[in-house]
Structures are given as C-alpha cells and as structure tokens.
Amino acid sequence: MCLAIPAKVVKVQNSKAQVDFGEGVLREVDVSLVDVKVGDYVLVHAGYAIQVLSREEAEETLRLWREILEVESTLGPK
C-alpha cells in the first residue's frame, strides 16, 4: 500500500526541506518537485514532497489518520 502523509514545512534549503509530521516527528524530504516556503503544508510520499496542500486539507487528512489509528489500536493485533 502506498501512503502520502501531510507535513508542515519548517525549513527549506535548496531542494531539501525539514518537515514536521506532528507530535515532534521531523524529517528531511526532497522538495524539488514543488515550490514551497516555510509554513506551507505538503503531501510527502517516499521522501518526496509531491503536492502543496492548504492548511485545511492537511489538517483534515491528519484528523482522519488519527481516527484510523485510534480505531486500529482498539482492534488489537491481527
């Protein structure tokens, strides 16, 4: 399964950016495919930012992820 996760751009240097996935999870991603600045939200897949999102789109997607993880945690191991 391929997943793309929203993240907030906290630092940009050339074609790399440090992004925040929330809850203190920071990672460096390649932003050569998009035009971003600090404060933007991006969709990250396999280490690449593939799309710029509005804040609302990113927050809604993150809210849905949290809901999925909460439900999954109640189901226990498979």
Image: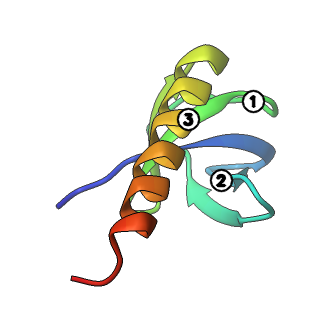
Could you give the CA–CA distance between mark 1 and mark 2, rounded to whole angstroms? 16 Å
**Type of amino acid under label 3:** Arg
Label 3 close to label 1 by CB (< 8 Å): no
Q: Secondary structure at mark 3?
A: helix
Q: Secondary structure at mark 2?
A: loop
Which residue is labeled 3 in the image? 63
Which residue is labeled 1 in the image? 37
x, y percent for residue 64: 46, 36
Residue at 35% across, 78% down:
76
x, y percent for residue 78: 21, 82
Q: Is 1 on the left-hand or right-hand side of 17?
A: left
Which residue is labeled 2 in the image? 21
Q: Secondary structure at mark 1?
A: loop
Q: If you read the primary sequence from the N terminus, does the residue marked by circle 3 or circle 1 appear first?
A: 1
x, y percent for residue 39: 80, 30
Pointer 2: residues within 10 angstroms few (<14), some, or many (20+)?
some
Pointer 1: residues within 10 angstroms few (<14), some, or many (20+)?
some
Q: Is 49 on the left-hand or right-hand side of 9?
A: left
Instruction: Say which of 60 and 42 sits in front.
Output: 60
Q: If you read the primary sequence from the N terminus, does the residue marked by circle 2 or circle 3 appear first?
A: 2
Circle nearer the viewer, 2 or 3: 3
Is residue 25 in view? yes
Is residue 35 in view? no
Residue at 37% across, 62% down:
72
Quadrant of the frame with the N terminus: bottom left
Residue at 81% across, 34% down:
38
